[in-house]
Image (cartoon, helix red, strand yellow):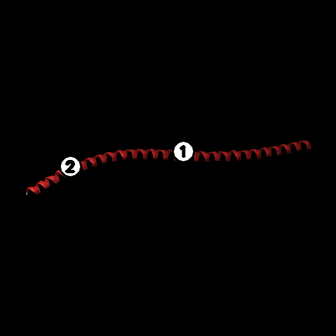
Amino acid sequence: MADVLRKIKQAEQDAEKQLADAQAEVGKIAAEARRQSVQLVADATDGSVSDTQATLDAARAKANKEAEGVAKEGQKVVDAIESSAADRKDKAVAHLLEKVNSQ
């Protein structure tokens, strides 16, 4: 009978140890899962920031290119107006001199 009680006591101690080991393993698994989830969120955030920055850079480059085109076209118009004004100015001065001299 004492032998049976000793075996029961030993079985209870083995079961308690297995339970404690299992609980420790659960804690380790949960901690690793939390660490991985934090890493996934951080990676996703970094990826999102990178994608957003790339989109902004592409939009900025496109806008700059379009602005350069508009500026070149505007400069052509300004140059044409200045050229036309210079020609008309010479004619206007000549006309005024002719009028003044003829009086």
Give the left or right position of residue 42, taking residue 73 as reference. Answer: right
Viewer can see residue 1? no
Provide the secondary structure element on which disc 2 rests: helix
The percent position of residue 60, horizontal first and vertical second, equals 43, 47
Residue 82 screen position, x and y as percent? 25, 50
How many numbered discs, if any? 2
Q: Which mark is residue 16?
A: none
Give the image location of residue 92, x and y in percent.
16, 52
Q: Residue furthest left?
A: 103
Sequence order check, earlier mark of 2 and 1: 1
Task: Residue at 13%, 52% (x, y): give it.
Answer: 95
Relative to 100, is 28 above or below? above
Specify whether 6 is left or right of 84.
Answer: right
Badge 1 crowding class, 10 Å Cα cut-off, few under 14, some 14 to 19, many 20 or more, is few
As rendered, which of 61 and 80 lies closer to the eye? 80
Q: Nearer the viewer, residue 21 or 60?
A: 60
Split into 4 quadrants, where in the image is the N terminus? Answer: top right
x 26%, y 47%: residue: 80
Name the residue rendered at 39%, 44% in the picture: 65
Q: Is residue 55 left or right of residue 103?
A: right
Q: Give 15 or 38, whichever is nearer the viewer.
A: 38
The amino acid type found where label 2 is placed reads: Asp
Q: Which residue is mark 2?
A: 87
Q: What residue lies at 15% left-to-right and 52% top-to-bottom?
A: 94
